[in-house]
Image (cartoon, rainbow, N blue to C red):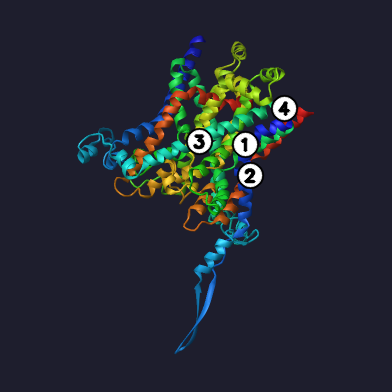
Amino acid sequence: MATHAQTQSRTLIIASTAFVLFWLLIASIPFMWTLWGSFKVEGDFFSKADWKNALWGTRTLIETGGTFTGNGYEGAFYEEGFGRAAFNTLVVVFFTVVISLTFGTLGGYALARSGHSYAFWLLMIALIFRAMPHITLVSGYLLPFFEWNLWGRLPTSIIVLVAINQPFTLWMLHSFFLNIPKELDESARVDGCTQFQAFRLVIIPVMWPGVITTGLFSFLLAYNDFAVTSMLLSQENQTMVPRIEGFLGSTFEQGNVMFAVAAVVSATAPLFVLVMFFQRQIVSGLTAGAVKG
Amino acid sequence: MPHKTFFWFILPSLAAMVLFIALPLVSVAVQSLFIEHDQVLIVTENCGPFGCTQETTVDFAASEVLRAEKPLGKFNGLGTYFDRGHLATAEVALAWQDRTSLGDFFSGLYNLPFYRALAFTLSYTFIVTPLVIILGLLIALGVNRLPGMLKGPTIFLSLLPMIVTPLIGSLILFWMIDAQGIIGKTLQWMFDDPQLSLKASAGLTWTTLMVYGVWHSAPFAFVVFYAGLQTVNTDTLEAAQIDGASRFQRIRYVVLPHLTPLVVFIALIQLMDNFRVFEPIVGFSAEANATSLSYIIFADLRGDVMRFNSAAATSLLTVLGVAILLTPVLIRTWRDFKGKVV
C-alpha cells in the first residue's frame, strides 16, 4: 500500500517538475533567443537557410568577418537616434514615478485614515477609472491638446501618465497605510502635532517599503506605455516604445529589422535588471491587492 | 480625519484624476456628437464660346477658416453612433432581413468594423481569462513542490513575460513565429507545409494573439496563487491526509476553496486588462485579421485624417462595455459596504 502511494507520488513529482520546466522554457527562451540573435545579421536571426546558422552565426561570419556583430546596435543608436528616445524615456519615467508617488502617498494616507463613506466611493470611482482603456482617454485629450498647443511635449505626457497611474497608486498605498497602526499617528496628534506633521514626522519614516513597491509598478506603467506616448509625443520627443514601433515601418529595407531587434533588446535590459533586484517587492506588490480582497 | 484635512490631502491626486480622466471622458462624449465640417464649395460659371458650364471647386481657404473657428466640427447628434463604422443599425437591419441562416447573419455582422472588433475583444477576454487562471494555478502548484533553492530563479524567469513591455513582448514572439523565424520554420517542418504562415488566416491569427495573451498574463495569476498557497492551513491539510484523502482530494477540497477569493481577484483584473487588448495587435501586425475596440480607436486617430468623432464614439461605446463588465463587481462591493454600515 505504502509503496503504491510512493510510486504514485513519484510520477506526480516527475510530471509536475517536467511541467514547470516546460513553462520556464516557454517563458524565457524567446528572450534568450532574441538577445543572442541581436548580435547576428538578419540572415541568421531569421532562419533563411538553416536555423542552426543563428547559433553559429554562419552568415554573420561571411558578412561581417566575425561571429558576433554590433551592427544592429550601431544602426539603432547612431543612425536612428535611439539614444535620444532612451533619454526621453528616462525623463518621462523619472518624473511620472516621483509625481505619482507624491500625490499617491498623500491621497492614499487620507483614504486610509478617513473612515467617512466618501472615501469608499472615491476608491470605487478609482477602480472604474482603473478599468478605462487608456486609448479611450487619449481620444479625449487629443483635440483639446492640439487646440491649446500642448501636444507633443514631454510634460504633457508626464502629467497624463501620472493621472492614469493615480487609481492604481491610490489603491495600493491605501491598503498599505491600512497596515500601519492608527495608534502611531494618533499618539502624535495627542502630543500636539497637526495631521500633516503627524504624517511627516511619524508616517513618512515608516512608509518606504510600501512606497518602493508602489513605485516599481508606477515605473512599469510609465515605461511600458504605448497608447499615451505614441499618440501624445512629437517625433523628436518620442520615448523608446513608440520609437520601436516607428522602426517597423521601415522593416523591409535590408538590415533595418536588426535595428529594431537591437532596440528591443536595449529596451528590455533595464526591465531584466529591475526584476533581478526587486523580485521580492514585485511579488509582494502583486499579491497585496489580493490579500486585501 | 476632519473633512477639511482630508480634502487637502487628497486634492493633488483628485485634481489629476478629474482633469485627466474625468474631463477627457466628458470631452469624448462631446466630440462624439460632432462631425467634421463639409468642405466649403464654390460654384463658378465658365462661359466660353460653346455655352456656359458650371464648375464646383473646394474653397480650401474658407474650409480652413471654418475649421479653425470651430475645431469640433458641426453638430451631428447621435448620427456617428449609428453610422456604418459603429453600431450600423441600418446595415444590421438589412442583414437580418436578408439572412438565410443565423450563421449568415453573423457573418454579415462580422463584415462591419465595430462588430468585428467587438467579436475579437470579447472572444479574447473570455478565452484568455480562464486559460490564464488555469495555467497560473498549475504553475503555482508545480513551483510550490520544488525544493526551496530553485524557487527564486524559477519565479524570476516566470515573471519575465509579464514584466516586459507588451509591445516588445509581442514583437519578440512575432519575429519568432514569422514564416522565416525559428518557431514558424519548425511549424512548417512539423506540418510538412512550406507555405504555412500564422499570419495567413483569421483563425491562426486569433490563436496566435490568444496564445500571446496567456503567455503574457499567466505569470500574474501564478504569483498570486503562489502567494495564496503559502498561507494554506497545514493543519487542515494534515487532518485531511490522516482521514485518508488522496492528493487530488486534498487539492480539490482543501487548497482550491482556500484559493477561491484569489480566483475572483485575478478574474477581475484580467477581465479589465484583456478587454483593452491593443498592443499585441500592433506588435503582431494583425490588424488585417483581428482588430479590437482599442485598436480601431487607435486607427481612427492615427490615420491620415484624424477622425476624432469616430474615435470618440467608439471610445464611449468601449467605456459602456467596461461599465457592463464591472457592474457585477460593483454591485457586490456595494452590498458588502451596505452590510458593513447596517
Write down the residue under mark 1: B12
The chain carrying label 4 is: B
Q: Between tags 4 and 2, which lies in front? A: 4
Residue B57 visible, this orientation: yes
Residues under labels 2 and 3: Cα distance?
Answer: 22 Å
Q: Is residue A206 above or below residue A221?
A: above
Q: Residue at x 57, y 46 (%)?
A: A137
Q: Residue at x 68, y 35 (%)?
A: A122
In this view, which residue lies farthest toward the front?
A192
The chain carrying label 3 is: A
The chain carrying label 2 is: B
Report the quarter where the N terminus of chain B lies.
top right
Q: Give the amino acid at mark 3.
A: Phe
Q: Give the amino acid at mark 4.
A: Met
Of callouts 4 and 1, which one flags the residue occurring earlier in the amino acid sequence?
A: 4
The location of residue B120, given as percent across then percent down, is 53, 46
Write down the residue under mark 4: B1
Write down the residue under mark 3: A95
